[in-house]
Image (cartoon, rainbow, N blue to C red):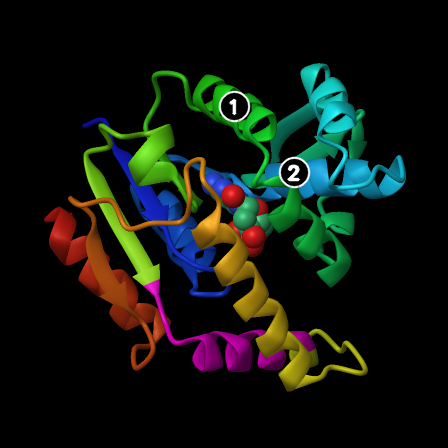
Amino acid sequence: MKYTIAIDGPAGAGKSTIAKLLAKKLDILYLDTGAMYRAVGLKTIQEKIDIQDIVKIDAIIEDINIKVRYIDGKQHTFLDDVDVSQKIRTSEVSLAASNVAVIKSVRLKMVELQRSIAGDQSVVMDGRDIGTYVLPNAQFKFFITATAEERAKRRFLEMKENGEKNVDYDIILEDIKYRDKNDSNRSFAPLRKAEDAILVDTTELSVDEVLQKVLANMNA
Ligand code: DC
């Protein structure tokens, strides 16, 4: 059985948790597309490129070297052949990723890469435009969301658990609201629920409840 599964939704809704569990259960490829936009964001930081400088961004994106490899079943993202999987998780990079993701040339390039990584195999991809743009013919589409406050609370607890210091709930909430607005209001392939996607509001649900809901909708 071949699966193509698209999971979209705003930042911090739990998309990647569900996508990873699904990929494991079905033994299929998982592609975290946000990691690729994060790598582009990191590149602009490293090269000190102004986000408004579309000409420069158009130029670097043409031959940007982003690769995805799977090591022990886990996605690693490489920028210029350096494993940046950890480096792309900072809030500075989150912001840069959301900002570069509004640029059309960046999106076209990432979508081309995403489709080529998936190829013909079964895949679960998570992102913002998977069901609407990257895989419009996906067999299963889910839009996973939760209130901004709940998403900020989860991110806050996760950061605390990871031993991060100076974690501020209000800053996390602001960051989430900024990214929601930026990701939803861009003109090209914005964050939007595909008409045929199933909406799953996870605000009141546990991870297992979300997974069961998704699997039930797939009859899997
Ligand atoms: O899923 P994430 O938080 O790692 O994504 C980082 C940013 O990348 C997000 O704010 C918007 C952008 N993004 C996108 O525009 N389209 C995708 N398919 C995935 C991510």
Tell which tag, 1 or 2, sits nearer the viewer.
1
**Kind of residue indicated by mark 1:** Leu
Residue 114 on image: x %, y %: 49, 26
Q: Is residue 149 magenta?
A: yes
Considering depth in this image, is 180 or 199 the residue closer to the camera?
180
The stretch in magenta equals 145-159
Residue 220 on image: x %, y %: 15, 48
Kindly state the secondary structure of the residue where label 2 is placed. Answer: strand
The picture quadrant where one finds residue 102 is top right
Considering depth in this image, is 21 or 86 the residue closer to the camera?
86
Q: Is mark 2 within 8 Å of ligand 1?
A: no
Considering depth in this image, is 133 or 12 the residue closer to the camera?
133
Label 2: how many Cα within 10 Å (few below 14, some 14–19, many 20+): some
User: Seen in the image, is 25 located left or right of residue 99?
Assistant: left
Label 1 sits on residue = 108
The picture quadrant where one finds residue 67 is top right
Residue 64 on image: x %, y %: 73, 21
> Which residue sits furthest left?
219
Q: Which mark is residue 54?
A: none
User: Seen in the image, is 160 located left or right of residue 103?
Assistant: right
Residue 158 seen: no
Label 2 sits on residue = 76
**Kind of residue indicated by mark 2:** His
- Residue at image x 53%, y 30%? 107
- Residue at image x 75%, y 18%? 59
